[in-house]
Amino acid sequence: MIGAVDIGGTKIAVGMVDDGGRVLSRMQTPTDPNRYDEGIELISRLLRETAQKSGVEITGIGIGSTGPVDPIRGEFGDVDFLPGWRGKSPVKDLAQIFNVSVALENDGDAAALAEASWGAGRNRSRLIYVTVGTGIGGGIIIDGQLYRGVDGAHPEVGHHVVDPAGPECSCGFRGCWESLAAGPAMVAWLETHAPAGYPHREGITAKKICELAQQGDAIALQAVDHEAFYLGLGLANLINLFTPDAIVLSGSVMKSAPLFLDRIRAVIRSGCRFVPAEKTQLTLASLGDDTNLIGAARVWHYRFGKQA
Ligand SMILES: [Zn+2]
């Protein structure tokens, strides 16, 4: 039984995941950005409690974490919103506490591994996983192997530029895919373009825009169209660069995927003429809200599963 740890900027989820990718028990807690030692203590306690709850023994631990991590050394990198965690090694620390093998990956890579083995990406050897929520992240699987950059680096699919005149991004560029096609971009578009008397402006969210669009609200439909255009551009770029078997779409914005998919496909068809773009399947992630947690467990299987 694998203890799974999903570390995000605002919360840490912990759970027990069996060999088929099923979550038997889970708990979560807010992330305390500064105190790593207390964080590890808390994670250990939650691992013990979730194991006890489902009456199992932990045989390995997998971690998926937001931000740059060093999967080879098992250390946190320059994680923006977790300044006190930089350079720390949860792999070494949890291995010592639980006396089991521990593996760490970026959470986008972890989720990609989960969808590739237990979810919508099964039997697709070239697969790109893309999650669209408050940001855009993902992971790339080529011939069944997780693609890693130099020194094990995780490529940032959300930070390829689609419009150099676009909004500033925290990475240093303007007009990254993330800054134009993540949930907040849809909100920003509506706030800028809705007429003065638009009744839904106050406290509008990406989710609310999708609901309004489903009800036929003309402004929300324009926001959705704009969003779908930029989603389509980024996906078309990925298809031109990789021509994968499938792109698995996930994240809160993709819960409303039917609103976007026709336009996305039209954008892809309008370019991508030199690759067999129609053969790349756009498919929705199938593991649901626990994808990252299940992914964390998959990280262990990916690293140690063959020998176990
Ligand atoms: Zn960027």
Image (cartoon, rainbow, N blue to C red):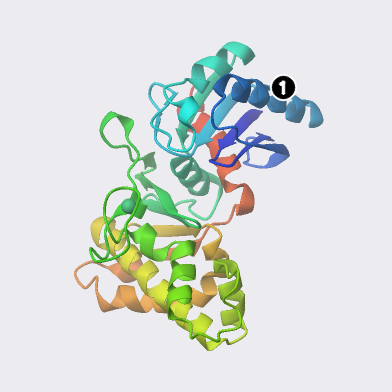
Query: Can see residue 308?
Result: no
Q: Residues within 10 Å of mark 1 (few under 14, many from 20)?
A: few
Residue drawn at 32 percent across, 73 percent down: 268
Residue drawn at 62 percent across, 76 percent down: 211
Position in image of residue 111 (x %, y %): 50, 45
Which quarter of the picture shows residue 20?
Answer: top right
Q: Amino acid at mark 1?
A: Glu
Position in image of residue 207 (x %, y %): 59, 68
In-front residue for pair 199/259: 199
Q: How many marks?
A: 1
Q: Is residue 216 left or right of residue 192?
A: right
- Vertical placement of residue 265 versus 167, above or below: below
In-front residue for pair 95/201: 201
Location of the C terminus by quadrant is top right
Residue that lies at the very extreme toward the front in this rendered image: 196
Location of the N terminus by quadrant is top right
Residue drawn at 38 percent across, 32 percent down: 78
In-front residue for pair 80/295: 80
Residue drawn at 62 percent across, 13 percent down: 97
- Vertical placement of residue 179 versus 145, above or below: below
Position in image of residue 108 (x %, y %): 45, 44
The residue carrying mark 1 is 57
